[in-house]
Image (tube, rainbow, N blue to C red):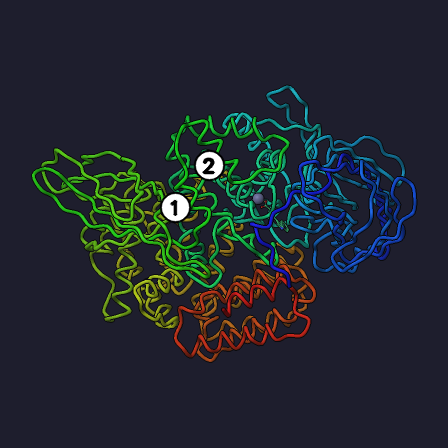
Amino acid sequence: PQTIFLSNYMAPGWHVESVNLTFKLAPEATRVISRIAFTPNPDAPAQPFMLHGEELTLISAAIDGVAVSPDLTAAGLTCDVPDGAFIWEAEVEIAPVKNTALEGLYMSNGMYCTQCEAEGFRKITYYPDRPDVMGVFTVRIESDLPVLLSNGNATASGAGWAEWHDPWPKPAYLFALVAGDLVAHNDSFTTMEGRDVELNIWVRAADLDKCAFGMGALKRSMVWDEQVYGRAYDLDIFNIVAVDDFNMGAMENKGLNIFNSSAVLAKQSTSTDADFQRVEAIIAHEYFHNWTGNRITCRDWFQLCLKEGLTVFRDQSFTGDLHGHAVKRIEDALVMRNRQFQEDAGPLAHPVRPESFVEINNFYTVTVYEKGAELVGMLKRLVGDDGYRAALDLYFTRHDGQAATIEDWLAAFTDATDRDLTQFKRWYAQAGTPRLTVTDDFKNGTYSLHIAQQTPDTPGQTDKLPLHIPVAVGLLDDTGAEVVATTLLELTEAQQTFTFDGLASKPVPSILRDFSAPVIIERDVTQAEQAFLLTHDTDPFNRWDAGRSLARAVLLDMIANGGDLDAGYINGLRAALTDSTLDPAMRALLLAMPSEADMAIALAGQGQTPDPDAIHQTRRKAQRQLAEALATDIPAVLSSVRIDAPFAPDADQGGRRALSNSLLSLLTWADKGTAAQAQFDTADNMTQQLSALSILLAHGAGDAAAQAFYDQWHHDRLVLNKWFGVQISAAQPQDAVAVATRLTQHPDFEWKNPNRFRSVIGALTGNQAGFHRADGAGYDFVADWLIKLDPVNPQTTARMVAGFDSMRRWDDARREKMRSALTRIKDTPGLSRDTSEMVTRLLS
Ligand code: HT7
Ligand code: ZN
């Protein structure tokens, strides 16, 4: 397979002025008739005329009305063309019903839908399928299905046909078409510019009662983008469609967002608080793409973080503004530490702006998205709120309607704020998580912080240069009073010293407040200092982080030396738990012990080889001992967070439910499930019902509840995904593979549906001790299923094979078994390009 390099970028030889498409829809034989007006690009080097096209049957082609016979290859076609502008016309045939890869035009439960990002449009018709070719699309759909949708505004319709026109030039990856027997949850919005916009969420009739929350989220997003970024919506209609078979969360097609049904449908009885939060965030994310992605798109796929990192940053800010920044920052930092740092430390590490790829679908990663968002956040910290707004305003004015690059993005910051970002740009090119080694001293009233930075080698990259890192620091005195408020230090050298004068005594530093940069801090901190910060730090993120570091240290100590849960840690948690000035959500976060993956990462970071079983057993023991120690405190806290109002999926109630479910989990050690069963039986919302089920299963007392849950919810495919997943996530390590095996034999295990597949196979890879069973049965089970899925859906297979990326962390025996499972996948005849690239990188 061919590797594509950023350094080989070449401007397109032709621009597209307009595109007219006619779709005559039929499951086995859809005809797509295209009429494309091309003009030569005077700024491009000479090149042959080439159109991408895959899995298409060409029926006819013509240039300026004269039939032509292009040269066809597996990747597309080439053809002699006139010197100046010309009209290309073609008719192709495709078979949406046979498209199980869910890329291009495919069918899901009788409905037609499309997914064109990144390179799916080439499976619909011959076209220059690259993001820097932007055209104005007019689309006619012919079908007997009642609802026929495409991008832009509806222009005309009749029995069996509809026409759409999108006035905004766009790349082909933003094209979308939907045809189905759908109903709409309808609303409207008037923009700050006075435009009346029709809003629709299109679903199957049975799902109509799950749309109200998503619609509210859409309207909140529209208001927020106007108020915070000054950006208004720019069409007369905004359509969202829910689809059951979808490879990712959702897609920002211009004016016609297509969503995985799990990312848009929500109601009290079927959705958890986490689901509501996810739905709101994804709706916001896709809506925000209208400006950051659609109006300004990417020049090429190497620039993916230009739209994704920025749009994730925007959706994170939106969630923080609406529901509280402290909790959101902790949640985002957990994603960085548990997932992105792991990616950055393993064989799949790559820069936020990669320099090469075989299959671009493999680079929709936590590095491009979440680390990309962290880079935007660091820029904002460095230039300040006003500088950030000025830079964004300049970026929008300068590049509206263009396909831009990271260079353009950084130039907007430099030009708007006069900051030199030459060094900062290294963040986009260097993979790996920087480690900051911090030491300090105190002399004559001056406190000095010495910080050294180092970024480890990653595949294909050695000798990393120093980065420009914003490190937010505050200082506390020994009474806990803040003697230096949060100050932004700018670390630019390999080693640098920062001093603070006029202090009466040596302060306690609070470093990397608000997780001001995606780095690892290495500093000898005593447990006493962590406990002190847990009690006194004024920065909520660092207060939580001190508790988390303390918990990790205590647990690692238990793994190494046995013994019981540390009394100081228990007292710190008791103080936090009973501190009614603290948000319940924050208390729930403080109470949550580091995950098993977190502990494995920590051990590996210390150069040790983690034992997944020891981690699992120690964590359970610690939870049992914590439950015993807090037993008398729990009832009062529980009653103080009881909710006496009708259900609302808001931050306050969500925090209360999170805390009471954590406490329910602790209570279950003593009552063996009485309270959890009672909650399961009486819950009026999915957060409480599912938590109770999970707790019962984790304590070996969940069989009856699991059956009852199935009986109640087997008709609801989204809830059924939870039923599959929870049984595996909550299984004990020795049982997880057997439970997963049993569930794959269940008649409701529709393995070609990505959500269902992930709910079983993904849940197993997420059960650390279960997946990493010493005999390798977890690896074999997952490998078998990935081999089976690959020919059907390469994209989802390739994403899931990344579950093996912790390979280097484990002992030789496990590593060898992981290698042999991966090698078996690699040697599978006809393996897709997607999976093949991933397995090759994992094995390198
Ligand atoms: N921009 C989209 C990324 C995407 C995608 C979505 C659905 C299916 C396949 C996909 N390939 C790439 C989603 C987003 O980031 O908003
Ligand atoms: Zn996105």
The residue tagged with tag 1: helix, strand or loop? Answer: helix
Q: Residue at x 49, y 31 (%)?
A: 412
Rendered position, 33 above or below 346: above
Q: Residue at x 50, y 75 (%)?
A: 819
Extreme residue in the top direction: 194
Residue neighbourhood size for the residue with mark 1, other residues' Cα within 10 Å, grouped as few (<14), some (14–19), many (≥20): many
Q: Residue 753, how many percent across, how many down?
A: 67, 60
Instruction: Give the percent coordinates (x, y) of residue 189.
Output: 64, 26
Q: Mark 1 belongs to which amino acid?
A: Ile
User: In the picture shown, does residue 664 fall above or below 255?
Assistant: below
**CA–CA distance in space, label 2 to label 1:** 13 Å
Q: Is residue 648 visible?
A: no
Mark toward the start of the polypeptide (2 vs 1): 2
Front residue of 692 and 80: 80
Q: Residues within 10 Å of mark 2 (few under 14, many from 20)?
A: some
Rendering quadrant holding ligand 2: top right
Q: Which mark is residue 330?
A: 1
Residue 23 visible within the image: yes
Picture quadrant where residue 485 is located: top left
Give yes or no for contact between labels 2 and 1 (Cβ–Cβ under 8 Å): no
What is the residue that sits farthest to the right in this orientation? 66
Residue in the picture at 37% in, 56% down = 463
| Residue 248 coordinates in the image, percent (x, y) | 61, 52
| Residue under label 2 | 317
